[in-house]
Amino acid sequence: MTDCGCELEGENDAQRKTLRVVLAINSAMFCIELTVGLLASSTGLIADSLDMLADASVYAISLYAVGRAEIIRVRAATVSGTLQIVLGVGVLLEAVRRFLGDSEPLGTAMISTGFLAFAANAICLKLISRHKGGDINFRASYIFSANDVIANIGVIVSGILVLLLGSQLPDLMIAVLIAGIVVCGGVNILRDVDRRKE
């Protein structure tokens, strides 16, 4: 019986399992990065933590959408893309606030936490890459995880520059860059949704 739907249900179960794992990783990293970012006065880490929160939200929405009708999956992707844009704009506003407030970030905390986040996102990227060719929400998740790896490298480099230069500017610059990546990721998902509607 080739039409029993067993293969599709098996794929759905595999997707759900992957999403639960990456959701747990991103939720934990959001808490860690936000805490360290606040203690270390690092806008870059705070921005990256909000990026983790956005990803966790995307994974939760994707988990809800797995195995459901196409219209529900498209709506879920729309929510994910919009959320990314909103959080990206929030990060930009936080960067401006900290620039005006003249914060003093701790470079060593940025570097160590950046490496931890890099490892977490690399694991997520590897897990999600197994499903990236399928559902629209998994393609969205893959884009977000790939962007996160780039952002983590940026946090590490900016932490090194903060140590070398004794300036908050590298921290603020990476925060703005992460915000831009988050917003662009959201815009790309919304474009993908529009193409699906055509």
Image: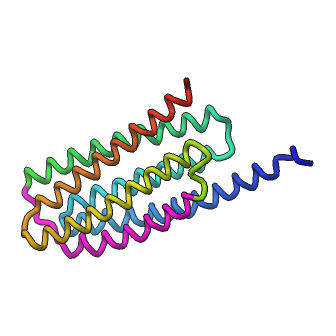
Taking the magenta stretch, the answer to whether it contains residue 119 is yes
Q: Could you tell me which residue is drawn at 87 percent across and 44 percent down?
A: 3
Q: Nearer the viewer, residue 47 or 32?
A: 47
**Residue sitting at x 45%, y 50%:** 143
Specify the farthest residue to the top.
Answer: 198
Report whether 98 appears left or right of 86: left
All told, the count of numbered labels is: 0
User: Which quarter of the figure has residue 185?
Assistant: top left
Residue at the spot 75% in from the left edge and 49% down from the top edge: 8
Q: Is residue 173 left or right of residue 126?
A: left
Q: Is residue 122 left or right of residue 85?
A: right
Region in magenta:
102-129
Relative to residue 155, is residue 13 drawn left or right?
right
Expressed as whole percent of the image width and height from the top left, the position of residue 9 reads 76, 51
Question: Where 70 sits versus 8, above or below?
Answer: above
Give coordinates of residue 100: x percent, y percent.
8, 50
Q: Position of residue 122 (x, y in %)?
A: 45, 66
Quadrant (top left, top right, bottom left, bottom right) of the C terminus: top right
Q: How is the image coloured?
A: rainbow
In terms of image quadrants, where is residue 165? bottom left
